[in-house]
Amino acid sequence: MKILNMAHGEFFILGAYVVLWITTAGANFWLGVAAAPVILGAFGFALQKGLLRFLQRDPIAAILVTWGLGMIIRQSLQIIMGPRPYSVSNPFPGSVSLFGVAYPAYRIAIIAIGVVIVLAVLWLYMKTSFGLQIRATIHNRQMAAALGINTGRINAVSFVTGSALAGLAGALLSPLIPIGPLMGLHYLIKCFFVVIVGGAGHLIGTVVGGFVIGGGESIFQFAIDPVLAEILIFLVALVIITIRPKGLIRV
């Protein structure tokens, strides 16, 4: 869509809040995980149809509008929920022994779910007629429209899918992070580094960028303080961007 959604981090943290609200009401954690992508997908659909479709030809305006939306969401959450962070109970509190090392069971579950989601998105993008229409729209919007592809529909479904995945990510990570109004901004920055390091506009690049940023930070945390590990992985990302400005996987 050639639009940077600066509120994407807030979509992520709203997914975590959905789980918090549902579990606080006494419902099951997995019900919250199922509800988060539906609610955030509907929110994304309303945003795309009500606002972003009018900004398709002005990427700068879209950046400013979504940044403003992110600020509104953050301030609204502070007013409604307060500034303090909340937590959600871990559905799998135990650990699993891997090669003699105890590893949290829920983190293994998240890894498995993440792999399934990535494979599903890759299949949708590469192996379906809808994915072909998405790729055609990305490469040449005018030609795709001339061939009869409804580019407006492609935009709407793509933005809804991205919004739903952000909500699902926030929901799945909710037991592992402090749920606060400002946490979305923290993850937005990481997401940008992942996309830029891997190569913008390339799904495989995003996967590679995720391994570099997320995997690298996890490895560094074994040896040094977590805050220093985060600083170090961002420095590594800056070096990679300097050497390969178009990312590790070039379109």
Image (tube, rainbow, N blue to C red):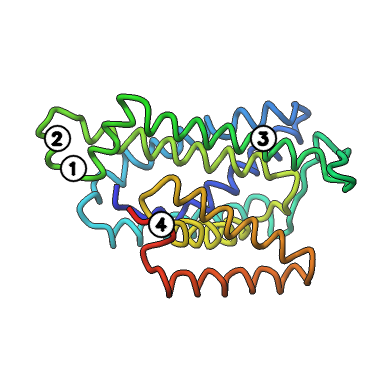
- SS category of the residue bearing label 3: helix
Q: Which residue is mark 1?
A: 141
Mark 3 and mark 1 lie on one chain; the one further toward the N terminus is: 3
* In this view, the mark in front (3 or 2): 3
Q: Amino acid at mark 3?
A: Ala
Q: Which residue is mark 3?
A: 112
As measured in the structure, the alpha-carbon distance from the residue carrying label 2 to the one carrying label 1 is 6 Å
For label 4, the crowd category at 10 Å Cα-Cα, with few meaning under 14, some 14 to 19 and many 20 or more, is many
Q: Nearer the viewer, residue 22 or 115?
A: 115
Q: Nearer the viewer, residue 202 or 193?
A: 202
Mark 3 and mark 2 lie on one chain; the one further toward the N terminus is: 3
Mark 4 and mark 2 lie on one chain; the one further toward the N terminus is: 2
As measured in the structure, the alpha-carbon distance from the residue carrying label 3 to the one carrying label 4 is 24 Å
Q: Amino acid at mark 1?
A: Arg
Q: Nearer the viewer, residue 93 or 16?
A: 93
As measured in the structure, the alpha-carbon distance from the residue carrying label 4 to the one carrying label 2 is 26 Å
Q: Which mark is residue 199?
A: 4
* In this view, the mark in front (3 or 1): 3
Residue 111 point in image, percent of width and height: 67, 40
